[in-house]
Image (spheres, rainbow, N blue to C red):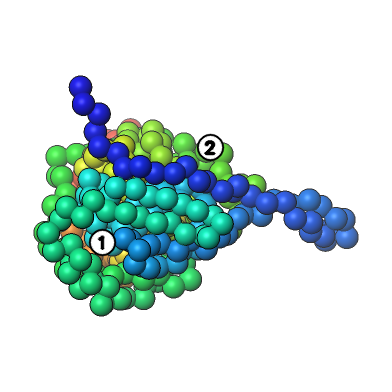
């Protein structure tokens, strides 16, 4: 059986934490881990696109996922190579240049930039809403309350950089309560993009998966989940008015304030199956 196409990529992850000295409330000097933060400038066929501040956990996946979610490349097959070089803080993407009109499409997208509510200031290229109406999510999949609780417990138990150093956001892709990927970064959108990149590299279908994030559910977060065809979006945080509006429009099942056995179901109620308790039957 022929292996699926995979671009030539480096494996240039950075150390995730660094140790510095801090003084506590008792005047004691303590070695303390802190999260890394590095600039990474993305080049697409030698054209500078953006500089991301990143933890450096999965720079190649982050690069691919960013290009995917910004619709700057249409498929993993368009990418020939991703070369990350931390000496120059750069990620150079070379395409196979097989898509007719790709240069023109790229130029059109780069003309329009929207500053978003991402950590710091995020940027989205092109029209945020241009492709929303064309997105169709599966309606034949369900998320049970039991599976939601299992996911929240799995996330709680997961060993994270946040537990040791703080200062990061985490995102997970899950199926039936089992974590498939868990990525942390200094910005929540970086973590989303890195997972999107890994999904492309590993040919993972998102149409029956659950996406979990520690960050708030803004319009951009909802759009990215929908672009990955993921029907379930869960956050331990809250959401914005536009995020709620777009979630209703695309029909995504969105759950916020999800911690331990607490949650708020905002949209897409038809996919959520609540556990029937004995008191509910009385």
In the picture of the structure, the residue carrying the numbered disc 2 is: 157
Question: Please, is residue 47 above or below residue 145 in the view?
Answer: below
> Could you tell whether 244 is left or right of 52 in the image?
left
Binning the other alpha carbons within 10 Å of mark 2 as few (below 14), some (14 to 19) or many (20 upward) gives few
Task: Provide the secondary structure element on which disc 1 rests.
Answer: loop
Question: Please, is residue 128 above or below residue 68 in the view?
Answer: below
For this orientation, the residue located farthest to the top is: 1
- Of mark 2 and mark 1, the one earlier in the sequence is 1
For this orientation, the residue located farthest to the right is: 27
Query: Closer to the camera, 161 or 26?
Result: 161
Question: Viewer-nearest of labels 2 and 1?
Answer: 1
Q: Position of residue 107 (x, y in %)?
A: 23, 72
- Which residue sits at x=38%, y=36%? 180
Q: Position of residue 18 (x, y in %)?
A: 68, 51
Q: Quadrant of the N terminus?
A: top left
In the picture of the structure, the residue carrying the numbered disc 1 is: 72
């Amino acid at each position: 059986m022929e292996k699926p196409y995979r671009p030539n990529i480096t494996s240039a992850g950075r150390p995730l934490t660094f140790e510095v000295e801090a003084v506590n409330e008792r005047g004691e000097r303590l070695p303390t881990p802190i999260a890394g933060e590095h600039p990474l400038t993305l080049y697409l066929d030698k054209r500078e696109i953006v500089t991301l501040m990143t933890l450096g956990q999965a720079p190649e996946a982050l690069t691919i996922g960013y290009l995917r979610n910004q619709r700057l490349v249409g498929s993993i097959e368009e990418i020939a190579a991703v070369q990350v070089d931390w000496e120059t803080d750069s990620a150079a993407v070379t395409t196979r240049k097989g898509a007719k009109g790709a240069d023109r499409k790229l130029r059109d997208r780069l003309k329009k930039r929207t500053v978003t509510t991402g950590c710091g200031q995020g940027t989205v290229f092109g029209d945020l809403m241009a492709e929303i109406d064309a997105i169709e999510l599966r309606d034949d999949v369900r998320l049970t309350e039991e599976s939601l609780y299992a996911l929240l417990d799995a996330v709680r138990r997961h060993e994270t950089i946040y537990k040791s150093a703080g200062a990061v956001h985490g995102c997970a892709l899950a199926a039936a309560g089992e974590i498939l990927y868990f990525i942390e970064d200094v910005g929540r959108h970086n973590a989303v993009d890195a997972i999107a990149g890994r999904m492309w590299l590993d040919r993972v279908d998102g149409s029956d998966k659950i996406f979990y994030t520690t960050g708030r559910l803004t319009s951009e977060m909802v759009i990215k989940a929908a672009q990955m065809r993921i029907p379930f979006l869960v956050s331990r945080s809250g959401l914005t008015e536009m995020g709620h509006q777009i979630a209703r429009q695309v029909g995504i099942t969105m759950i916020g304030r999800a911690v331990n056995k607490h949650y708020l179901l905002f949209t897409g109620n038809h996919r959520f199956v609540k556990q029937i308790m004995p008191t509910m039957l009385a």
